[in-house]
Image (spheres, rainbow, N blue to C red):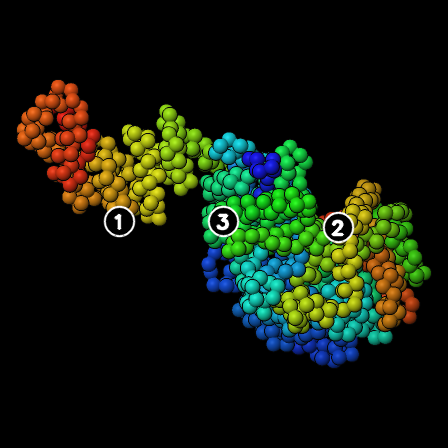
Amino acid sequence: MTTALSIARDVNAGERSASSVLAASLAIVAARNEELNVFLHVDHEGATAMAAAVDERVAQGLNAGPLAGVPIAIKDNMCQTGIPTTCSSRILDGWRPPYNATVIDRLIAAGAVPVGKTNLDEFAMGSSTETSAFGPTRNPLDPTRVPGGSSGGSAAAVAAGMTPLSLGSDTGGSIRQPAALCGVVGMKPTYGLVSRYGLIAFASSLDQIGPFAATVTDSALLLEVIAGHDPRDTTSLPEPSPVLVAHVNDGVAGKRIGLVRELVEGADEDVVNAVNSAAEALRAAGATIVELSIPELRLGLSAYYLIAPAEASSNLARYDGVRFGLRVNGDDVTAMMEATRTAGFGAEVKRRIMLGTYALSAGYFDAYYGQALKVRTLMIDAFRRAYDHVDLLLGATTPSVAFAFGAKSHDPMAMYLSDVFTIPTNLAGEAAISVPFATGEAGLPIGVQILGPGRSEAQLFAAARVLEIADGRP
Amino acid sequence: MTLANGWEMVIGLEVHTELLTKSKLFCACENHFGSEPNTNTCPVCLGLPGSLPVLNEVAVDMAMRIGIALHCTIAPSTFHRKNYFYPDQSKDYQISQYDLPINSGGYLDLPDGTRISIERAHMEEDTGKSTHVGGSGRLAGASSSLVDYNRCGVPLVEIVSGPDIRSALQARAYAAELRGILIATGASDGRLEEGSMRFDANVSVRKANEAFGTRCEIKNLNSLRSLQRAIDYEALRQIKVLEAGGSIRQETRHWDENLGETSTLRVKEDADDYRYFREPDLVDLAPSDAWQVAVREALPPMPAARRTGLLAHIPEPTGPERDAVDVVVDLDLDDYALGAIAGGIAPALAIARASNEVAAGIENRANLSVDAFTATLTMEQSGALSATQAKTVLGDILESGGSPEEKAAQRGYEQLSLDSLATTVATFIEQNPDEWNRYREGDEKLAQFFIGLVMKATKGQANGKAVIAELQRRR
């Protein structure tokens, strides 16, 4: 499929119609969705109307926006007016949000055409889409394997060529890990760069919306459209969207990049080799590679599995059967709430609610949640010290290429380890990108991760672009 | 105050007040009492998935007004989530302030001079309102419940006193004084009947000067009378238990207004573990120094200062005069009293008329300007109107507006001008030469004789003081 950049250029120039682009996109969805289970809902009617509106603007001689006529897939934990929004959970059964997430408003204003909602691990809790109440998504590159998660549907939509762009959310790696496993570009922006208004919360202090795309430039283009301050999210950064696309080809000459021991530790050999060749490629492009160790990163996983469930236990309290979604009746209101939550949530969500409730309980708070917050501070300090010496950090996105269904779904700890390299960035509120580089076992893609301090997105895209070119995708 | 057998009450109050903002604490929905159920709602206050709170700056401004009026320190603060499941709480957690409140460490001086410490005055959101159908009207035993989320997200400030209150009457005085302060700040309308202010009372008893006893918390008292009655009942209940050799269990109790009793709501062991943690959807709150200064400077005088100011006009105030001053301040009628005093009216008269006649027609105060009030009292003071007439004229103006001259004319009071009074007095002097002579020779009692005649002739509408003045002029 052509890039978003070229589609928008062609649509604005009147060389292609948004409607024909949409039709091509929907044809691929129709051909492969049954097999891959990427979309939970396809909004044929709405998307057709939005594409027609874009064509109408172009016909009137107006610029239809930087994403004119570009079909985009939306992870099904973002609200879009009137469109079923499930978080891949039974508990939201039948709920249609009465409002748009800020990112949806911005996409539509930029001329993009949201085509539907993609599958995810239930409430974004998982690394394979296997916890979805509506069945897992299959990896388009090898349907016997997982696409990663939690934003597995959105990664697969781009990998399968259904849409050139998609949105995911990343709480502990939920964009970067599936991007790596599906061979696409996935970026987790600085916390606060993209408004969370309308993103259904998993762990509020960690959640961040970000782009999936087949190319680094498209990824930068999409982030430019959705980033920038939103008065409806007080945690959003008080500044306009950064200039990104214009810096994509800035290169890495003169940059110091740290190759971090803890970000390849325990990874498969093919993954380690890919990271080392990525370091070589960056060196060849003029960067200085520094090998370094940040031992605090090893504490990330345990801190994350206290902080994220603690916030989730509170964020998911509202699914009580009173106002929306599923209701299972009981003898009294407490029984109704218990019955609703028992029937509505899957096992992984229940596990994390229990963990989080425990971590926040009187008598345990200091030992668990309080301790995890201290580790989080250590992590932030450790990153800051590293960035005193280098501009960016380099490592693997995931320990392995895409794994088979069932390989980890019965062992939560093994599944949690899929995110061991991505979690520290979320805890620190910083930015990181996963870019496909080389291939590994069975010819499957490997994701290399580049990490940067807050607001380093332009540098991250430029470095990722160097790897993209070195990997043979000019 | 010491009770029988040397017992003493120890009381601390937690007072919730709704703020008079136009919109709710975290969304733009209207903050309005009495709308159709569930009409003032949006994704944020309904807690719909994906919605986020945005702090209302006016609410912060009002919270600071309250803090400053209570002599608190304003400090950088944070919001926490208080987690518990309840249907009228849309998110199943309440956004409140916990270990770092916006206001802390203040005090309130009661009119009698007792100082009650204020531990904190923090911000939080109100819940919705449940109506339980069937059963006793409480959640337990109801056949179904309806929830109105109009109140959900309405801004509250919770004012927590120290355990410094020693009697139910003092608790009532504290609540009344706090109410006056809240109204004066403009942060609250103080309407108890609409739930704008609600009281929780922590009550324990001890023998004087011993350590504090175990306390019980009486929840949701919504009038000054209930507050006083509930505390009295609860303290006596505790004394009875202790004197019988029992011990007090720490618990939350419910006040039944009809039975006049408190009863156990839940014991401490069953209390929710609220799992407080920092609200990750909101950033820290740190009002700038300039903002704090602006709030401080814009704050009008508080009731205590206003009472002192009014009393300063009366050299040796009597009990009733002190009461009148209290009424004037409580009902915010200071402008009338002070305006009239500035216009040359005797302070005691100005305060008396404001506290009685204006207070009686307070719902129509817009009809009576300070100038018209002063003009009426000027006529009374000069004798152009009797006291009775002046009161009637004030009532008439409050009823329908207009000037005192106009109202006096409508009532037919104009013949009682000083000229006509002089003529009437002259007539009676002529008709009663003996009495007149005795009066001239110093028998002051005969003044009453002439006043009686004039009153009879004018059907009581003459001003007694003006009659005496005329008699003395002719003496």
Left or right: A308 in relation to B72: right
Q: Are marks 3 and 2 in contact (CB under 8 Å)?
A: no
Q: Are marks 3 and 2 on the same chain?
A: no
* Residue position marked by numbered label 1 in the rendering: B400
Q: Nearer the viewer, residue A431 or A41?
A: A41
Q: Nearer the viewer, residue B192 or A175?
A: B192
Q: Is residue A78 above or below residue A191?
A: below
What's the chain of the residue with tag 3? Answer: B
Residue in view at x 56 percent, y 59 percent: B128
Residue in view at x 47 percent, y 60 percent: B35
* Residue position marked by numbered label 2 in the rendering: A362
Q: Is residue A283 above or below residue B49?
A: above
Q: Tally the marks.
A: 3
Q: Residue furthest front?
A: B244
Left or right: B313 in relation to A260: left
Left or right: B413 in relation to A187: left
Residue in view at x 52 percent, y 37 percent: B69
Q: Earlier in the sequence, mark 3 or mark 1?
A: 3
Amino acid type, residue under disc 1 in the picture: Ser
Amino acid type, residue under disc 2 in the picture: Ala
User: Label 2: few (<14), some or many (≥20) within 10 Å?
Assistant: few
Q: Are marks 3 and 1 on the same chain?
A: yes
Mark 1: which secondary structure? helix
